[in-house]
Amino acid sequence: KAGVTQTPRYLIKTRGQQVTLSCSPISGHRSVSWYQQTPGQGLQFLFEYFSETQRNKGNFPGRFSGRQFSNSRSEMNVSTLELGDSALYLCASSLVDRLGNEQFFGPGTRLTVL
Amino acid sequence: AQSVTQPDIHITVSEGASLELRCNYSYGATPYLFWYVQSPGQGLQLLLKYFSGDTLVQGIKGFEAEFKRSQSSFNLRKPSVHWSDAAEYFCAVGPFNTDKLIFGTGTRLQVFP
């Protein structure tokens, strides 16, 4: 079974631009979450989508948004990029069943904002 | 406030030595606890998880962790470290049935031959 895939793997943007990152979950997984990883702040939860609905949201400004499609694929968008948005963005998917969630992470998208 | 503390930023051990990585959490409800490992340039891989039941949990790659409610701890252990275990290790806590995990700041493990 294929793992979580994220595209692109690397991205370079300039301040003020916007960016869209894509995540394809493991087949059958209905929940997709996004995390931002930086050296200063560590791993921080961005948002979680389940069945095309945002179920949880972290403490990030409105410039960060996401969505989930009917096939469970997800995208996250960052508008008006700032230098501080440079980070590794990790996507994770989970099955969501009565045994509790086990999240499987993708390799991440490395975003550099110049 | 909900939080996870990993007091050791960097640990160095010799290959073959035993390992214990510390994790303390603060969480209002019954915690769902995880240990993840991240190799350079990679995503996170789940080592083990705890929700209920036996407080000693076995994971992959020979790792185990013990949940101690009285100490709010979930320390990761391995009896004999291999050079391939060099990586960054993250402890995380979250509610049951959602993916909103709170991660610790991580412990970087270095292994000397």
Image (cartoon, coloured by chain):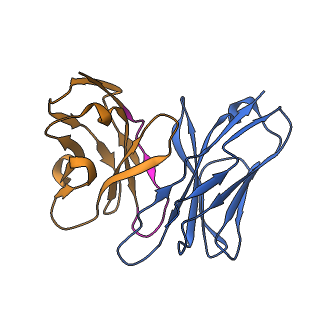
Chain colours: A blue, B orange
Above or below B8: residue A98: below
Residue B112 is a magenta residue = no
**Which of the two residues, A71 or A56, is positioned nearer the viewer here?**
A71
Q: Quadrant of residue A114?
A: top right
Side of B24 where A84 appears, left or right: right
Where does the image place residue A28, in percent across and percent down from the top left? 53, 75
Q: Is residue A31 something one can see in this rendering?
A: yes
> Is residue B101 rendered magenta in the image?
yes
| Residue B63 in sight from this viewpoint | no
Q: Main secondary structure of the magenta part?
A: loop
Q: Quadrant of residue B69?
A: bottom left
For the image, the number of numbered tags is 0
Is B48 on the left or on the right of B39, as rendered?
left
Residue A107 position, x and y percent, is: 55, 47
Could you say which is closer to the camera, residue B60 or residue B93?
A: B60
- Residue for point 52% across, 60% down: A3
Residue A90's spot in the image, x, y percent?
A: 57, 48
Q: Is residue A45 above or below residue B77?
A: below
Could you say which is closer to the camera, residue B111 or residue A56? B111
Report whether B31 appears left or right of A95: left
Residue span colored magenta: B95-107
Query: Which quarter shows the C terminus of chain B?
Result: top left
- Direction right: furthest residue: A16
Q: Residue at x 61, y 49 (%)?
A: A59
**Is A107 drawn above or below residue A75 in the view shown?**
above
Q: Reply above or below: B35 against A75.
A: above
